[in-house]
Image (cartoon, grey):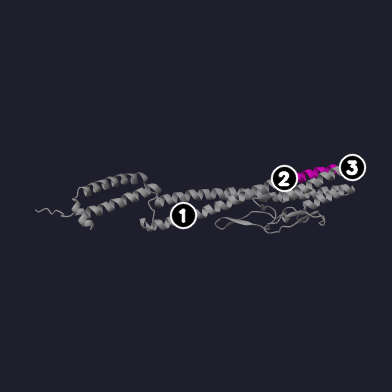
């Protein structure tokens, strides 16, 4: 039996070194990223699945960003309407006081003066802006309410009746505002007109009870409209929870498709590094002229 000896092992050793170095590089990347798929060629089918998961993750991030951008506006609008309701409640109280037949003209004038202040306060509240956007101007970017002596109510609306919507999920659009014309100046529920009528009635000492009833209608109407913002905030909470759960599910899917077995990869890396060292040592023991001849 004869034993064949490879007269020139250089090509085999260099090929082995290249292979083990590639294995070291692959294991190093997998440990760094925690993923066994770091380029399409690692697993074409898995890479396609991973791409779809990442696309859905990006879409989820976009929806979450949209929700974050509108939540503060909802909260600000809801808080503003709370202040409007408080002001209207005070106006009702003043109207009831003004209807007291024992009040003098000067007493009613004091009540009317406070109501004028409330009217000014309500204009300011109706012009509330959040991050540079008026909350109650519809889709317009102009200040929605201005004092106007030519208007019967003393206030003019400069916004529009349109609404803004934001996409917060697949096929899920959320209305993010109510126009001021709907909230504050609806026919028969115009809070500015009702306050102005009450001020006029106090000055004339006539029809005060009727004027108070108008303010009460406006109070009830704004209170009912405020429910829109409470419901919207509840929808935001629900959709945020859904998106957070979806994000966790996508993370689990990604790990199932591409997650590296860290303990196994770490062990492989140690073995590959040992093999690389042994191969380098073997190359180092080769006659220099053999190595140089091969590399020429």
Q: Which residue is mark 3?
A: 106
Mark 3 neighbour class, 10 Å CA radius: few under 14, some 14 to 19, many 20 or more: few
Residue sticking out furthest to the top? 102
Judged from the image, the secondary structure of the residue bearing numbered disc 2 is helix
In magenta segment, residue 140: no
The residue shown at (30%, 51%) is: 21
Residue at image location 48% in from the left, 56% down from the top? 55
Q: Nearer the viewer, mark 3 or mark 2?
A: 3
Q: Earlier in the sequence, mark 1 or mark 2?
A: 1
The answer to the question of whether label 3 and label 2 lie on touching residues, with beta carbons closer than 8 A, is no
Mark 2 Cα-neighbour bin, 10 Å: few <14, some 14–19, many ≥20: some
Q: Secondary structure at mark 1?
A: helix
Q: Is residue 95 magenta-colored?
A: yes
Q: CA distance from mark 1 to mark 2?
A: 44 Å
Mark 3: secondary structure: helix
- 61 sits left or right of 112 in the view: left
The tally of labels here is 3
Would you name the residue on which mark 2 appears? Answer: 83
Point out residue 243 in the picture as x, y percentages from the top left corner.
53, 50
């Amino acid at each position: 039996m004869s034993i064949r000896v490879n007269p020139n092992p250089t090509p085999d050793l260099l090929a082995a070194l290249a292979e083990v170095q590639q294995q070291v590089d692959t294991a190093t990347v997998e440990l760094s990223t925690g993923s066994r798929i770091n380029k399409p060629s690692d697993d074409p089918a898995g890479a396609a699945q991973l791409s779809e998961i990442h696309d859905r993750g990006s879409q989820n991030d976009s929806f979450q960003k949209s929700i974050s951008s509108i939540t503060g506006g909802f909260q600000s609008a809801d808080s503003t309407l709370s202040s409007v309701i408080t002001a209207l409640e005070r106006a009702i109280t003043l109207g009831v006081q003004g209807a007291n037949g024992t009040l003098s003209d000067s007493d009613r004038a004091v009540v009317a003066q406070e109501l004028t202040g409330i009217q000014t306060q309500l204009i300011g509240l109706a012009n509330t802006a959040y991050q540079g956007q008026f909350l109650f101007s519809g889709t317009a970017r102009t200040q929605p309410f201005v004092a106007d002596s030519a208007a019967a109510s003393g206030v003019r609306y400069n916004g529009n009746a349109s609404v803004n919507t934001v996409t917060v999920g697949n096929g899920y659009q959320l209305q993010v505002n109510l126009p001021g014309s709907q909230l504050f100046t609806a026919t028969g529920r115009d809070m500015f007109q009702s306050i102005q009528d009450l001020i006029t009635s106090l000055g004339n000492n006539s029809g005060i009870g009727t004027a108070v009833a108008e303010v009460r209608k406006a109070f009830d109407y704004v209170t009912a409209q405020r429910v829109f913002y409470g419901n919207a905030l509840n929808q935001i909470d629900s959709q945020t929870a859904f998106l957070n759960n979806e994000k966790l599910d996508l993370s689990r899917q990604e790990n199932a498709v591409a997650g590296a077995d860290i303990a196994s990869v770490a062990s492989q890396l140690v073995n590959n590094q040992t093999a690389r060292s042994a191969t380098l040592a073997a190359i180092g023991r080769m006659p220099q002229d053999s190595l140089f001849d091969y590399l020429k």
